[in-house]
Amino acid sequence: MQLTFTLAPEPDDWSREAGRLLFAGPVTFVKGVVAMPGLPPADRPEVCFAGRSNVGKSSLINALTGRKTLARASNTPGRTQEINYFALGEHRYLVDLPGYGYAEAPVAVVAKWQALLKQYLSGRATLRRAFVLIDARHGIKAVDEEILTLLDRSAVTFQAVLTKVDKINRTERAAVIEQVKGALAKHAAAYPEIVVTSSEKGEGIETLRALIATME
């Protein structure tokens, strides 16, 4: 049976408020992790954000948290190939995975990152969902398919999040949504709702906050 994919609905008032409260509270950078033993204690639910380079991941994390420079911690020299943990108060972890698809990255660096990513995805019991960011100007590419397949194999539920929708018109938006729906239909671990966002305009931010806040 093939799943039917739809756009994530607007959150109800309770979920919207839960999301607002979660992200209005303290948000702190915990640590960058380069090996599984370095992960923080698995004492709370966590969600991770993945996306190819230049997809707008840092901008989205900053928009979610309302802090303009928070995600820059993961872009400083030495942290580019780390799994970066942020604490949302004492109730959630938000995990920023390194951007993938860097054509210029050395083969050895890419192999090391891929190995760590596989270990993290398959071995983190408190990981509730992976949000896979897709640039709305380009849709799902071959490099995205690689990580979607990895998520399938790791049995990690993932949800597609379109970024930069303010950069395209309505016709282009409709076309890319259909392309993403078709691509997701091939992946068993795909969550059947797509979140459409613009970090610049604030579209979809409340929806994403509510999803994270209400995840058990």
Image: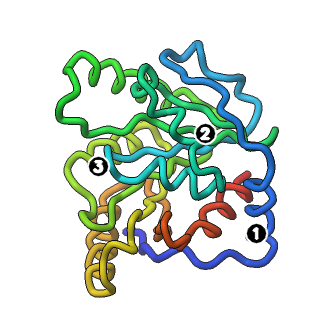
The answer to whether mark 3 and mark 2 are in CB contact below 8 A is: no
Q: Residue at x 81, y 72 (%)?
A: 14
Q: Secondary structure at mark 2?
A: strand
Given residues 88 and 151, the one toward you in this image is 88
User: What residue sits 43% from the left and 19% below the top?
Assistant: 78
Q: Quadrant of residue 153?
A: top left
Amino acid type shown at disc 3: Asp
Image quarter in which the N terminus is found = bottom left
- Asked whether disc 3 touches disc 1, contact meaning CB atoms under 8 Å apart, the reply is no
User: Which amino acid lies under the numbered mark 1 shown in the image of this protein?
Assistant: Ser
- Asked which secondary structure carries label 1, the reply is helix
Q: Quadrant of residue 31?
A: top right
Q: Residues within 10 Å of mark 3 (few under 14, many from 20)?
A: some
- Residue 194: give x, y in percent of width and height: 46, 68
Asked if labels 2 and 1 touch by Cβ distance under 8 angstroms, the answer is: no
Q: Nearer the viewer, residue 102 or 177?
A: 102
Numbered badge on residue 127: 2
Give the amino acid type for the residue marked by disc 2 in the picture. Leu
- Above or below, comparing residue 138 to residue 50 in the picture: below
| Residue to which mark 1 is pinned | 15
Q: Looking at the picture, does residue 39 appear above or below residue 94?
A: above
Point out which mark residue 45 bears: none
> Cα distance, mark 3 to mark 2?
20 Å
Q: Label 1, label 2: how many angstroms apart (C-alpha)?
A: 20 Å
* Residue to which mark 3 is pinned: 144
